[in-house]
Image (cartoon, helix red, strand yellow):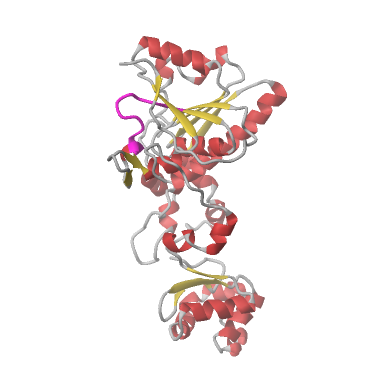
Amino acid sequence: MTKARPRNGSEARHGGPAGPLADVRVLEFGQIAAGPFTGSLLADLGADVVKVERPDGGDGMRNWPPLTKNATGQEFSENFASLNRNKRSIAVDLKDASQLAALRALCGRTDVIVENFRPGVLARVGLGYEDLARENPRLVYCSISGFGQAGPYAQKGAFDVTVQAISGVMSVTGMPDSEPVKCGVPIGDVCAGLYAAYAIAAQILEVRRSGQGAFIDCSMVGSLIGVSALQTSEYFGTGRAPRRLGSAHPRNAPYQAFRGSDRYFVIAAGNDKLWAQVCESVGLPDLVDDPRFKTQELRAGNQDALVPILQKIFAQRSAAYWLEDMDRRGVPCAPINTYPEILGDQHVTSMGTVADLELPNGMR
């Protein structure tokens, strides 16, 4: 194999000012999603992120469709670009002694290492935290894995769907009388990436204060349990497992999706004042005093009776009508957008949420 080298045009970039991590050097041994997402968040904050990939094709996500092709036929993965923006990249054969030695020397000049191999993979080639921290005590080393670095499941393989399943998330996702479903967004990967970037940023501050680096053990399953505070506290408080409710809420109603005459929309009447406005909107002001629905707790407990009453009325007019009327009354509401709809929305455009990336093949 050749020596460690930059991968030709590997990074997708968008312009912008230097961020708060502009003086931070990161080596990312990331693959697929969780590790690369962490690296992209650090790069967004200005860090100089260098992605380390194997020479025989690199990160497997490089081949994930959709592939954008330029006039000469050169292809580049849109998915890969979305998680690897603003990075540089090198290809290193970890089985080549000279390349491995060069990489270890680079680790000695690095502030942060991010990796999401199974536990122990990098340690077996001398790139574990203990090996590198002896030479670089300021090093912040973050290992992202499915189940953490120790314990009975540590060596289990993990993808987002398996972590959503084992973490309990799928048990509360889907319709009550249907099979469990996964969240449409890969939240196992995303939440782990967010927790990892958050912990890394905090440890960078500690290094600047005390000069002491640290090892960060970030698991996908732990991250999903961490963001499930309402569900876990419900179990701890009642002794009962939370259940699937579709788009509904266990403690608020009406707080879910309804279908207008043309499409679905959502309302969130999270208190008695908002509930009164919903009753006025649908022309049933007496529902406010209905003994089944007088309090938030009663409405939540009697959704089987409440939802059909509202759905019958909502079906008579368009979603746009109900959204306009609810907005006017101050009731939180929203259409259920597709991604083309929200990405083209003038509000999202005004927020600057979406930025163009120039891909290595020249496409945008």
Could you say which is closer to the camera, residue 251 or residue 7? Answer: 7
Q: How many marks?
A: 0
Specify whether 79 is left or right of 353. left
Instruction: Give the residue displayed 40% in from the left and 29% down from the top.
Output: 117
Specify whether 210 is left or right of 117. right
Instruction: Give the residue displayed 39% in from the left and 65% down from the top.
Output: 175
Magenta residue check for 53: yes
Q: In the picture, residue 133 is in which quadrant?
A: top right
What are the residue bounds of the magenta stretch? 51-62
On the image, the x and y values in percent for residue 265 come to 47, 72
Q: In the picture, residue 124 is in which quadrant?
A: top left
Magenta residue check for 307: no
Could you say which is closer to the camera, residue 105 or residue 301? Answer: 105
On the image, the x and y values in percent for residue 204 come to 63, 29
On the image, the x and y values in percent for residue 19 come to 63, 37
On the question of residue 150 being in view, the answer is: no
